[in-house]
Image (tube, grey):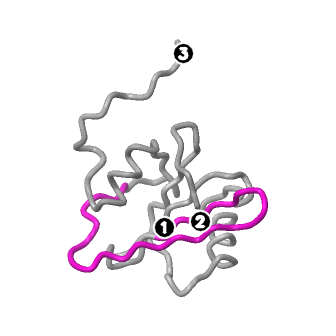
Amino acid sequence: MIQITPHMRILIAVDPIDFRAGIDGLAGACRQRLEADPFSGALFVFRNRARTAIKILVYDGQGFWLCQKRLSSGRFAFWPDGTAPTQGLESCELQVLLMAGDPTKTRAVPPWRRL
């Protein structure tokens, strides 16, 4: 089971990915397209072109976890855009995204950071 904690690094891929890719294909996409190490323990979030499904790839120290959520109706309304291949998310924002919500419209308290 994957436990998403506030201190986890979560990277969301801006561009869609071919969902025929399995663990090896997504790990390769992490290295090539996202320029990140798939063995770092970070959660990598990908979407399909139609915005109807999300895949999450994470390495837990023993092996990879690959999770997929496909919506039965509708599309994911939120997805970041920009010139960078990835964008960071907080754990609470990922939970909102997984419920097909828009994390930018939530009014959650920002995480505490030392000044």
Give neighbour class at mark 2: few <14, some 14-19, many 20+ (Cα, 10 Å).
many
Kindly indicate the quadrant of the structure image that contains residue 99: bottom left
SS for dot 2: strand
Q: How many marks?
A: 3
Kindly indicate the quadrant of the structure image that contains residue 79: bottom left
Q: Report the front residue among 32 and 69.
A: 69
Question: Do labels 3 and 2 touch, CB within 8 Å?
Answer: no
Instruction: Give the residue drawn at x 63%, y 67%.
Output: 65
| Alpha carbon distance from label 3 to label 1 | 31 Å
Name the amino acid, label 2: Leu
| Alpha carbon distance from label 1 to label 2 | 8 Å
Where is residue 73? Give x, y as percent: 22, 78
Lower sequence index among marks 3 and 2: 2
Instruction: Give the residue drawn at x 77%, y 56%.
Output: 61
Task: Residue lying at the far bottom in this picture: please name it.
Answer: 20
SS for dot 1: strand
Q: Which residue is mark 1?
A: 46
Q: Is residue 100 left or right of residue 54?
A: left
Q: Which residue is mark 2?
A: 57
Instruction: Give the residue drawn at x 32%, y 79%.
Output: 50
Name the amino acid, label 1: Phe
Per the rendered image, the range of residues in magenta is 55-80
Give neighbour class at mark 1: few <14, some 14-19, many 20+ (Cα, 10 Å).
many
Q: Is residue 67 magenta?
A: yes
Q: Which residue is mark 3?
A: 114
Lower sequence index among marks 1 and 2: 1
Name the amino acid, label 3: Arg
Question: Do labels 1 and 2 touch, CB within 8 Å?
Answer: yes
Q: Quick check: 98 above or below 67?
A: above
Where is residue 2? Give x, y as percent: 57, 58
